[in-house]
């Protein structure tokens, strides 16, 4: 059964106190979620355990991390392992966000290793892909995203896919206020599902949750989530305000 998910990626925003206030506001107004509708909150590492305790009694709301290291443990000063995240209460980890790829030079090969570490340690992966404006203008976005998925994800075995969510985030739409149109999102999501089907078969592709990310907000969420292959959103800026995030969750529930 394909799940619908709204995931909030706080990025490097909010102190522990500010995060506490935000989560209190979200939980207070959260409509009841069935098990096929989930909310994920991905705060900075330092908030994970606290945020987990805030939501642990609320069904179908989970904690995500924004990154993890590619090794299980060892002398990697300043890094955080997948096992630590799981133990602190995380259920999901975002892998391959375009900001990690760009500012931290994370390559496809590294992202493939991170995906393995996350899954090995019982985390579910939200694997991000998406093209730059140059690629979109050249009209080669389908090939570009397909190559990212092949290099970062398609070494997995079919049975592992139940623990993977794909997030399509066109870089030109992230934090820019310029959202992909519903048609652009649908076209790419359908392409991603087709590529997954070619690699793994139709059933895993049909069950795959594919999120859209990039300037998603309450005013455009309903239109995006109404697309046949858009199963929710990965939300940056609008996940930092309880009213906005709750508005997007409402759109997902009604979709
Ligand atoms: P945005 O970010 O919603 O602020 O555009 C989305 C993301 O980077 O996940």
Image (tube, rainbow, N blue to C red):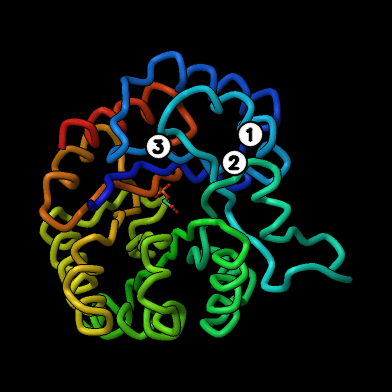
Mark 3 or 1, nearer chain start: 1
- Nearer to me, 125 or 220: 125
Determine the secondary structure under disc 1.
loop
Location of residue 161 with respect to 156 vertically, above or below: above
Disc 3/disc 1 C-alpha distance (Å) = 19 Å
- Look at the picture and state if 23 lies above or below 192: above
**Could you tell whether 245 is left or right of 94 in the image?**
left
At which x and y percent is residue 138? 24, 84
Residue at position x 21%, y 40% in the image: 220
Q: Which residue is mark 1?
A: 14
Q: Pointer 2: what residue?
A: 43
Q: Is residue 94 above or below residue 194?
A: above
Label 1 Cα neighbours within 10 Å, binned few <14 / some 14-19 / many ≥20:
some
Q: Whole-percent x and y of residue 236?
A: 45, 45
Please report contact status of discs 2 and 1: CB closer than 8 Å, yes or no.
yes
Mark 3 in CB contact with mark 1 (< 8 angstroms): no
């Amino acid at each position: 059964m394909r799940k619908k998910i709204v995931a909030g990626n706080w990025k490097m925003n909010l102190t522990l106190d500010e995060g506490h206030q935000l989560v209190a506001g979200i939980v207070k107004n959260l409509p009841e979620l069935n098990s096929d509708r989930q909310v994920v909150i991905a705060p900075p590492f330092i908030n994970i355990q606290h945020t987990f305790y805030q939501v642990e009694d609320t069904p179908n709301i989970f904690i995500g991390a924004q990154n993890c290291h590619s090794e299980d443990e060892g002398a990697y000063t300043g890094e955080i392992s997948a096992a630590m995240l799981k133990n602190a209460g995380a259920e999901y980890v975002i892998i391959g966000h375009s900001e990690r790829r760009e500012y931290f030079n994370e390559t496809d090969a590294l992202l493939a290793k991170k995906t393995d570490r996350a899954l090995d340690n019982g985390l579910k992966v939200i694997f991000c892909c998406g093209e730059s404006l140059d690629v979109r203008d050249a009209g080669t976005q389908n090939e570009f995203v397909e190559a990212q998925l092949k290099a970062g994800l398609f070494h997995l075995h079919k049975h592992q896919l139940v623990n993977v969510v794909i997030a399509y985030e066109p870089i030109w739409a992230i934090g820019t206020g310029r959202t992909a149109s519903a048609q652009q999102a649908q076209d790419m999501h359908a392409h991603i599902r087709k590529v997954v089907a070619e690699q793994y078969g139709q059933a895993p592709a049909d069950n795959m949750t594919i999120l859209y990310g990039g300037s998603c907000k309450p005013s455009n969420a309903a239109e995006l989530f109404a697309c046949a292959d858009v199963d929710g959103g990965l939300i940056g800026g609008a996940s930092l305000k309880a009213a906005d995030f709750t508005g997007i969750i409402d759109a997902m529930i009604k979709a």
